[in-house]
Image: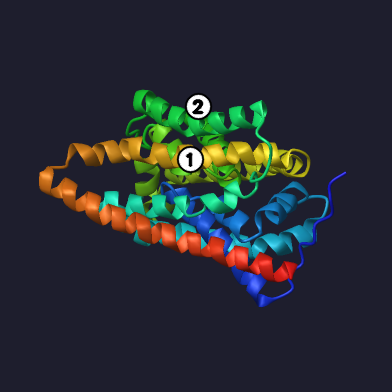
């Protein structure tokens, strides 16, 4: 039987935190490197979110009321990802990616805290190594099967594929360390899907149906996989976090070996490479400082609660 989790908001602060978590998830769909579910762990919302998704039909009202602020945040983050982050990636791609990698690295302490103090065992080490390899293997696959596929001349098979992609994207949002962006790049649809959002999609039903299929797949994936994640959090938490820590490390490494960065490297000359590397390191440090500050805040809050 699932452990009962209190989903009622007790203050405006808790509602704002859920909106921020949702915002991070929405942003992470567009932005390579950032993990909304990792932010959810930092802000102590991850367990509740998985519980709400996995018990949506059993406790519909209370779960929906809890998820509404997260949904609002997802919508805001998704829109900002297109309006602002897309522009930054176009103008300063390497620097922007470095900033988001810094955000991810700053979350490592809060993730590794979940397995800190546990005696090392073979299964834990294997899961950690497997977690590192998964994002790297996805990047490797993207080099062979990826590309720039256009959203034209679509047939029934294409729309079924978009539902499958939506299901897989849901996994990237509930398992820290996986990237929806990298997944879309692997299938070769990242640029097309990013550029397809706009007023034109409202005039072209075939194009609009692409996004409807992705959303349907995403919803199916959330409902299916959240039950599995909720079970792992309850019964195999330490082992689960070994894999999560590995995924987070692997994601940081994979970002710099992905098609996006390889394309950037190919356009570098000596001057632009030096400039990007220097400013990129600064941006990475700033990103690290922001999320590491969240870790310090979380640590101090926990210390106060234990006094």
| Residue 68 visible (yes or no) | yes
Q: Nearer the viewer, residue 248 or 192?
A: 248
Q: Is residue 303 above or below residue 273?
A: below
Which labelled disc corresponds to residue 157?
2
Tag 1 near tag 2, CB within 8 Å = no
Which labelled disc corresponds to residue 288?
none
Location of the C terminus (image quadrant): bottom right
Query: Quadrant of residue 130 in the image?
Result: top right
Q: Secondary structure at mark 1?
A: helix
Badge 1 is on which residue? 249
Q: Dot 2, how many residues are within 10 Å of its Cα: few (below 14), some (14-19), or many (20+)?
A: few
Query: Quadrant of residue 163 in the image?
Result: top right
Query: Is 5 left, or right, of 202 in this rendering?
Result: right
Q: Residue at x 41, y 46 (%)?
A: 32
Q: Measuring from the top left, give residue 238's x and y in whole percent.
A: 69, 41
Q: Measuring from the top left, give residue 263's x and y in whole percent.
A: 25, 38
Query: Whole-Å distance between the Cαs marked 1 and 2?
Result: 35 Å
Q: Nearer the viewer, residue 299 or 93?
A: 299
Q: Secondary structure at mark 2?
A: helix
């Amino acid at each position: 039987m699932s452990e009962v989790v209190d989903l009622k908001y007790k203050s405006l602060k808790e509602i704002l935190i859920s909106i921020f978590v949702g915002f991070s998830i929405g942003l992470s769909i567009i932005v390579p490197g950032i993990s909304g579910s990792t932010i959810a762990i930092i802000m102590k919302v991850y367990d509740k979110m998985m519980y709400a998704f996995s018990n949506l039909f059993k406790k519909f009202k209370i779960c929906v009321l809890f998820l509404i602020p997260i949904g609002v945040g997802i919508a805001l983050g998704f829109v900002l990802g297109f309006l602002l982050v897309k522009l930054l990636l176009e103008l300063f791609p390497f620097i922007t990616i470095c900033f988001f990698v810094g955000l991810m690295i700053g979350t490592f302490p809060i993730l590794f805290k979940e397995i800190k103090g546990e005696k090392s065992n073979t299964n834990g080490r294997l899961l950690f190594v497997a977690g590192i390899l998964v994002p790297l293997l996805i990047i490797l696959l993207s080099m062979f099967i990826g590309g720039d596929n256009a959203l034209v001349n679509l047939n029934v098979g294409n729309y079924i594929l978009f539902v499958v992609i939506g299901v897989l994207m849901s996994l990237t949002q509930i398992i820290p360390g996986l990237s929806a962006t990298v997944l879309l790049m692997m299938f070769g649809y990242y640029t097309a899907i990013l550029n397809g959002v706009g007023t034109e999609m409202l005039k072209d039903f075939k194009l609009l149906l692409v996004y409807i299929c992705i959303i349907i797949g995403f919803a199916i994936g959330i409902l299916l996989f959240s039950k599995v994640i909720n079970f792992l959090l309850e019964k195999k938490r330490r082992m689960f976090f070994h894999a999560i820590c590995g995924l987070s490390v692997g994601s940081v490494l994979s970002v710099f070996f992905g098609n996006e960065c390889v394309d950037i490297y190919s356009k570098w000359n000596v001057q632009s490479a030096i400039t990007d590397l220097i400013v990129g390191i600064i941006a990475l440090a700033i990103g690290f400082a922001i999320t590491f500050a969240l870790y310090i805040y979380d640590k101090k809050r926990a210390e106060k609660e234990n006094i």
